[in-house]
Amino acid sequence: MPYIAVTALSHAGLVREHNEDSLVIGPWTLCGTVTENPQTLLFPLGTPLVVAIADGLGGQPAGEVASALVVRQLAALGPSLDGAEAVREALDLCNEELYAAAAGRPELATMGTTVAGMVVRGRSPLTFNVGDSRVYDASGDRFRQVSVDDSPPPPPGRRTTSAVTQTLGGSTRPIAVTPHVTALETGADAPRWLLCSDGLTDPVPDEEIGAVLRVHNDGRAAFELWKAAMEAGGPDNITLALVRLGE
């Protein structure tokens, strides 16, 4: 029977005092907590399965509240996300819910989050993102980014930037978002994707991430990617999910 294997890990890193990342895998959510080891869940291929990572905005209040609200909303909506328009509507709803939750509560004002994820619905998944969390196609020997960074170009001499041009929430007044939603066609060469927050991609170059994924899979791959981010200083929360189709 065809199945979906999802291996996930979330960690605060070495610098941040707490974890503001959250993730959703089908009906399950992990919000602002730490996993000591990669965890793998298996699902039958059929009903739309949502897998997503939300990275609460650092430097602004209640990032962990914002990321948790988004993944819980996506968990509730997941089985209904049967097309690109449904995904866009779900992300619009998440954005509206963030602003509604913050209304009249100064401690939540300007809370926001990025999100990156995918909906696996047969062998034609949808990927989506708002912000700079990422989705990569890691099928076979490939490793290429399929999400679109909402970021300005990095400063001269630097590989990354912490600035973002679009997030869910994050402002004093409601601002509409334009989610990036892409339909993918899977080939026969071991379909697999990596979803991650910038706690992985900022300290670890794409070339190194791709090299790890060409050698390892599932739990070992997740562990080696986490280790690479930690050895690079672990400057931010590290959350990642590997999604693989199997027979």
Image (cartoon, rainbow, N blue to C red):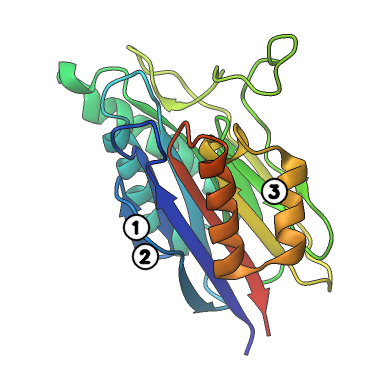
Give the alpha-carbon distance from disc 1 to disc 2, as whole Å. Answer: 7 Å
Query: For mark 1, what is the residue?
Result: 29
Q: Nearer the viewer, residue 18 or 153?
A: 18
Query: For mark 2, what is the residue?
Result: 27
Instruction: Say if mark 1 contacts mark 2, CB within 8 Å.
Output: no
Considering only order in the chain, which callout, 2 or 3, is on the residue closer to the N terminus?
Answer: 2
Q: Give the number of the disc on residue 160.
A: none
Depth check, mark 1 against mark 2: the one in front is 1
Q: Is residue 21 left or right of residue 220?
A: left
- Residue 178: quarter of image: top right
Q: Quadrant of the C terminus?
A: bottom right
Q: Residues within 10 Å of mark 1 (few under 14, many from 20)?
A: some
**Where does residue 125 sit, x and y in percent of width and height?**
66, 60
Q: Residue at 47% across / 47% down in the picture?
A: 239
Q: Residue at 64% across / 43% down in the picture?
A: 181
Q: Amino acid at mark 1?
A: Thr
Q: Is residue 114 above or below residue 156?
A: below
Q: Amino acid at mark 2?
A: Pro
Q: Amino acid at mark 3?
A: Ile
Q: Give the number of the disc on residue 209.
A: 3
Residue 124 visible? The answer is: no
- Residue 35: quarter of image: bottom left
Q: Quadrant of the N terminus?
A: bottom right
**Where does residue 206 sit, x and y in percent of width and height?**
73, 41
Q: Residue at 61% across / 19% down in the picture?
A: 161
Secondary structure of the residue carrying tag 1 is strand
Q: Nearer the viewer, residue 28 or 217?
A: 217
